[in-house]
Amino acid sequence: MKVERVIKYEAELDKDFSQWVVSVPGGEQIRDCIQCGTCSATCPLSIYMDYTPRKIILMAHQGFKEEVLRSFTPWLCASCYACMVNCPREIKITEIMYILKEKAIEEGMYPKRFPIPVLAREFTRMIVKKGRNPETKLIIALALRTNPLNLLKMAPLGLRLMKAGRLEIMTKSIKGKDQLKTMLQSLEATT
Amino acid sequence: MKEYAYYPGCSVKGTAKHYEESLLTAFDVLGLNLTELEDWNCCGATLALAVNELKSFTMVSRNLALAEKTGLDIVTPCSACYLVLLKTQDYIRRYPDIKAKIDRALKSVGMEYRGTVRVKHTLEALVNDVKLEEVKNRVTRPLKGFKVAPYYGCQIVRPYKEFDHPFYPDSMDRLLKALGAEVVDYPLKTDCCGAAIAGTMEEVGVRLNYVLLKEAQKRGANCVVTVCPLCQLNLEQYQGKINKRFNSDISLPILYFTQLLGLALGVPEERLGFNRAMVSADSLLEAA
């Protein structure tokens, strides 16, 4: 049997990452965490996570950059804010999950072929282009980029929605879509 | 007569059409006038926030700026839109750096946002701007036979506790009682339906919604009432799969509070979008 070290030495942790978390909006109080586990206990999705919210908060704070950004945990956060409202130290746990998602995309470290980051990116791309969210197109694009077989699985729901007149096939662009584009470009110029 | 800038969000133009249909007709009866915000854009929901927070805030600020020009409060039926609008306002207020970037972006297209807009959820507008007594007096068809599980979901009460308790709200309970419905005690009223994750990962959607529906059934509810397009869709779409997986017999219509409001106020059923249901409420409507 091969024995491997699973605990990291302090020198192997990414101090820049831990400082970055504290410096971004929402991450300021992460140092106040007392590891009580209220977040993990209230989280309805923690049963599916590779690290519970309590662990992710500690690991982000300590500088386990690689593990945190490759984790499924932030992507499984449904943004219900139960942890954040319950946190006795008022740590903005849900907002930290958002920051970690953004960072994981930026660094190309999000779990590949996992549907949620793909959905988030496709969605954002489409609304920036049109100014509106084309629900149907989005679902198709998502399936094509993750598992095309899902389209077959989703077909019955699609038909039921269509019968009820709840499926919008064509989404019109807004008049101000160029305005939106200019605004977003202005951001890039200043950051 | 009260005027609002109506921010519909994308869902009520598609999967949640019956929310908008019932909202506009029912609010009209009560003299709440919703004028759709001209050329609004998608708020990006919680998904765009995950990709780029600043871009997301910037897109939202265009809507805030458009609303500010009308001088009216924003009213939105979608809990995700509500959350994203409130979060944008919150971050603009608390982080001068974010505010400066957004101001510049707005200025680049000749717009500005001074921060004067008040954002309200449709439920919030109804319970805060109309006296419950007044609603009660307008009821012409009390909701007989409706045993309702009031489901608020998450983002209408968390993290911004604007108008009700973050875990045990009761504004909708009181409203539904005033409409003549029987409201069951429903302790899961703010537990999460899985939101966008339920839609993309079936295992999550089936399990979370099973828990919610099973509890409603156990408490004797014959329908669940929601305030959010995504909650409504999740609770409704998985019932078949839930029954197969957990060997249960759940068949609960998932209604919008505005559908029941309209019904009690005497609006004809056809104008409240009951025909768009995937789990029909016909038997309840006939008995009423």
Image (tube, coloured by chain):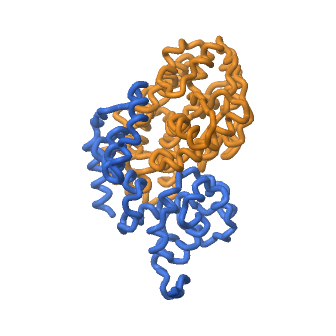
- For the colour blue, the matching chain is A
In the figure, is residue B194 to the left or right of B50? right
Chain B, chosen colour in render:
orange
In the figure, is residue B224 to the left or right of B17? right
In the figure, is residue B27 to the left or right of B60? right
Q: Is residue B109 above or below residue B151?
A: below
Q: Nearer the viewer, residue B58 or A125?
A: A125
Q: Nearer the viewer, residue A79 or A7?
A: A7
Q: Is residue B56 above or below residue A39?
A: above
Give the x, y percent position of residue A1. 52, 86
Q: Is residue B189 above or below residue B95?
A: above
- The answer to whether any part of residue B97 appears in the image is yes
**Residue drawn 47% across the image and 45% down it:** B199
Q: Nearer the viewer, residue B12 or B161?
A: B12
- The answer to whether any part of residue B99 appears in the image is no
Q: Nearer the viewer, residue B117 or A3?
A: A3
Give the x, y percent position of residue B69. 40, 36
Q: Quadrant of the C terminus of chain A?
A: bottom left
Give the x, y percent position of residue B196. 47, 47
**Residue drawn 67% across the image and 26% down it:** B176
Can you tell which quarter of the image residue A69 is in? bottom left
**Residue drawn 56% across the image and 67% down it:** A51
How many marks the image carries: the answer is: 0
Give the x, y percent position of residue B193. 57, 44
Can you tell which quarter of the image residue B168 is in? top right
